[in-house]
Structures are given as C-alpha cells and as structure tokens.
Image: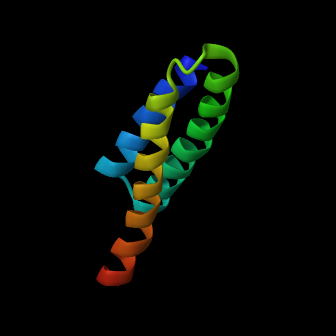
Amino acid sequence: MFALAVISAVLGVLAILGGVPLAVNAAVAIAAVVSGHIAQIGCKKLCNQRGAKLALAGIVLGYVGIVTSVVIPAFVG
C-alpha cells in the first residue's frame, strides 16, 4: 500500500501543477483522491501507518486540484 500512497502523492502534485487540459487535470486529481483513500485504508490495516501521511498529502492535493479544475473555468469562461 505504500506504493499506492506514493502514486497518490505524485498524481496530486501533477493535479496541482497542471500543464494539461483541465478535463485531464480533473481526472488526474480524482485519481489522486481515490488512490489516496485506498492507500490510507490499506496503510492503516497493513502497513501500521507507514505511508498514511503520504496518502493524506495525495488526498489533499487531489481535492485542491479538483477545486482548481472547477474554479478556473468559472472565472475564465
């Protein structure tokens, strides 16, 4: 589950940095949130909290990416 926590954090950073169309950015952010929640549950059960904070970082960054994917088009368009 630690690898899934790392994937969640990486996807969360990619969602924040963007550089891709907003629809793809939103999909990356949603993937970060979903994989982060799965990793956090798995880390609590299997890893004895190893990677739980990294998964939480991916969740938070994913949610911020989702919000920016919705807010930016609202102000631009």
> How many numbered discs?
0
Of the 4 image quadrants, the one containing the N terminus is top right
Image coords of residue 42 (percent x, y): 67, 25
Residue 57: image quadrant is top left
Q: How is the image coloured?
A: rainbow
Of the 4 image quadrants, the one containing the C terminus is bottom left
Q: Give the left or right position of residue 51, taking residue 71 as reference.
A: right
Residue plotted at (44% across, 54% down)? 25
Residue 15 shows in this picture: yes
Residue 44: image quadrant is top right
Q: Is residue 77 above or below residue 49?
A: below
Residue plotted at (47% across, 60% down)? 66
Image coords of residue 13 (percent x, y): 35, 41
Residue plotted at (60% across, 32% down)? 40
Q: Give the left or right position of residue 68, taking residue 28 as reference.
A: left
Q: Is residue 69 above or below residue 57?
A: below
Residue plotted at (37% across, 65% down)? 68
Q: Is residue 4 above or below residue 18?
A: above
Q: Is residue 17 above or below residue 10?
A: below
Image coords of residue 2 (percent x, y): 54, 18
Image coords of residue 4 (percent x, y): 56, 25
Residue 18 shows in this picture: no
